[in-house]
Image (cartoon, rainbow, N blue to C red):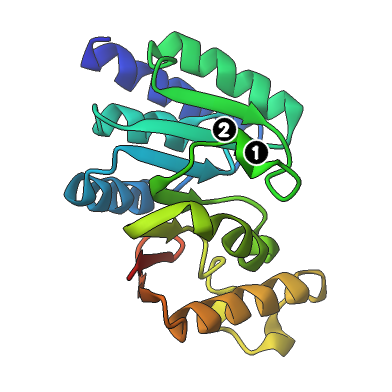
Amino acid sequence: MPDTTIEALFETMRSYAAAHHVPIMEEQGIGELLELLRQQQPQRLLELGTAIGYSALRMADALPDVTIDTIERDEERHEKALGYIRESGLENRVRAICADALELDIDELTPYYDAMFIDAAKGQYERFFNKYEGLLSPGGIIYCDNMSMHGMAEQPIKEVPRRKRTMIRNIRSFRKNMDEHPGFDCELLPVGDGLLVCRKK
């Protein structure tokens, strides 16, 4: 697919996301993620949180040798993602699965992945990690978006809106646990909305 065509598709997706309040990665954040992935050159990647397929297609476009499994529980967003994946011409390398990632039987997935990108329910990152890290190859990397949650993760908890406090406590706990995890080397990058990069030892 010509670059001009895929870029036009990405612009269409950004416009749709803005108009329909679909959260997609900020440009700075996804630019940094793509640069890290180009350095890593994974062959197989698992994404939790497809939304409309924007980040999956950006990753597939930037990494011509990667195959991606991406999971989304919202049926409407999943269907929209399928349409964009078909339009992109990348459907042979991007497999979109409609399921709750916390309920999916992992036997349906590839036995191993070189990289994982977690961008789903923000308060559930610890559970996602515990369920899926066993599928990550030694030396593989987990990338986690929204670790700052628009600065709320750095605020005193009393300043965080009450309805978001449980999520923020969970994010903080996850960040702390990963920082202390004996099996991973982790770094929190201050790009986009906070990108946590964890390499499996």
Along the line of sight, which residue is nearer the eye, 88 or 92?
A: 92
Residue 14 lies, in percent from the top left, at 47, 31
Q: Secondary structure at mark 2?
A: helix
Along the line of sight, which residue is nearer the eye, 8 or 131?
A: 131
Q: Residue visible at 65% across and 38% down?
A: 21
Q: Residue visible at 63% across and 90% down?
A: 156
Q: Residue visible at 76% across and 75% down?
A: 166
Side of 190 where 4 appears, left or right: left
**Residue position marked by numbered label 2 in the rendering:** 17
Side of 63 where 18 appears, left or right: right
Q: Amino acid at mark 2?
A: Ala
- Considering every residue shown, the one lying at the far right of the view is 163
Residue 112 lies, in percent from the top left, at 43, 45
Side of 166 where 43 appears, left or right: left
Q: Residue visible at 48% across and 10% down?
A: 86
Please rate how many residues cluster around mark 2, counting C-alpha atoms within 10 Å: few if below 14, some from 14 to 19, many from 20. some
**In this view, 7 is above or below 161:** above
> CB atoms at circles 1 and 2 under 8 Å apart?
yes
Residue 161 lies, in percent from the top left, at 75, 74
Which of the 4 quarters of the picture holds residue 105? top right
Q: Which mark is residue 86?
A: none
Quadrant where the N terminus is found in the figure: top left
Quadrant where the C terminus is found in the figure: bottom left
**Residue position marked by numbered label 1 in the rendering:** 21
Per the model, the C-alpha gap separating discs 1 and 2 is 6 Å
Res 164 seen here: yes
